[in-house]
């Protein structure tokens, strides 16, 4: 069997691993109600850091453009400090869309490239540009569903 020089891709990125794993979350996630409980409790800053790290974008850009928060507000928090309920819910919804993208593209680099590339099906915007609002996240998720089903997007 031939070996490939390509870096092995972790194709099992799910919401839990995107948010830092069970160790950071302090619990497993089996249902949507577990995600609601996590949101109500507040994610640790470490979960936000893990998601930003996966996306490979500057923390300042993500925090200010997507979460509409000051980077100083986030930087003042220790890694085990909790985010507020609204921010936690937003981060969880982003992780769910990224999980869908990983399932569709099955390659971390392709996911990052797709999220950062202008897309005609969303008026030439980059999917990441729509992550700041629930409607935008839903639209990106819809486009991913169309790609998954083989519809030109």
Image (cartoon, helix red, strand yellow):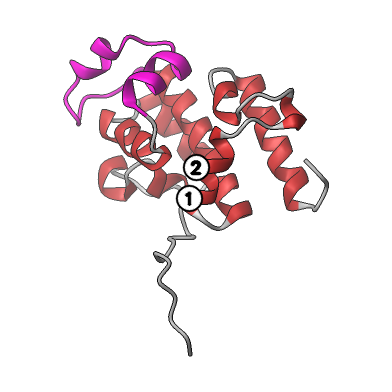
Above or below residue 136? Residue 144 is below
Residue that mark 2 sits on = 112
| Real-space CA distance between mark 1 and mark 2, rounded to the nearest whole angstrom | 5 Å
- Residue with the most extreme bottom position: 1
Above or below residue 138? Residue 23 is below
Which residue is at the front of the view, 137 or 130?
130
Mark 1 near mark 2, Cβ–Cβ under 8 Å? yes
Give the residue at x 39% y 32%.
Answer: 57
| Image x and y of residue 132, in percent | 53, 18
Residue 62 part of the magenta-drawn span: yes
| Image x and y of residue 17, in percent | 38, 49
Give the residue at x 54% y 50%.
Answer: 110
Residue 9 part of the magenta-drawn span: no
Which residue is at the front of the view, 116 or 97?
116
User: Which residue range is magenta in the image?
Assistant: 58-84
| Image x and y of residue 58, in percent | 34, 27
Q: Quadrant of residue 117?
A: top right
Q: Is residue 69 left or right of residue 99?
A: left
Q: Secondary structure at mark 2?
A: helix
- Near mark 2 (Cα within 10 A), the count class, few <14, some 14-19 or many ≥20, is some
Q: Quadrant of residue 59?
A: top left
- Residue with the most extreme right position: 151
| Image x and y of residue 141, in percent | 66, 36
Residue that mark 1 sits on = 109
- Near mark 1 (Cα within 10 A), the count class, few <14, some 14-19 or many ≥20, is some
> Which label number is shown at residue 151?
none
């Amino acid at each position: 069997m031939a070996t490939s020089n390509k870096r092995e891709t972790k194709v099992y990125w799910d919401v839990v691993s995107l948010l830092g794993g069970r160790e950071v979350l302090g619990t497993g996630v089996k249902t949507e109600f577990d995600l609601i409980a996590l949101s109500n409790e507040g994610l640790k800053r470490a979960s936000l850091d893990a998601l930003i790290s996966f996306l490979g974008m500057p923390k300042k850009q993500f925090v200010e453009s997507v979460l509409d928060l000051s980077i100083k507000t986030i930087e003042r928090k220790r890694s085990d400090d909790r985010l507020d309920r609204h921010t936690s819910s937003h981060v969880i919804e982003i992780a769910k869309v990224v999980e869908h993208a990983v399932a569709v593209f099955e390659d971390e680099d392709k996911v990052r490239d797709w999220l950062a590339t202008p897309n005609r099906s969303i008026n030439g915007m980059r999917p990441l540009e729509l992550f700041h609002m629930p409607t935008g996240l839903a639209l990106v998720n819809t486009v991913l569903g169309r790609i998954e089903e083989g519809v030109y997007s």
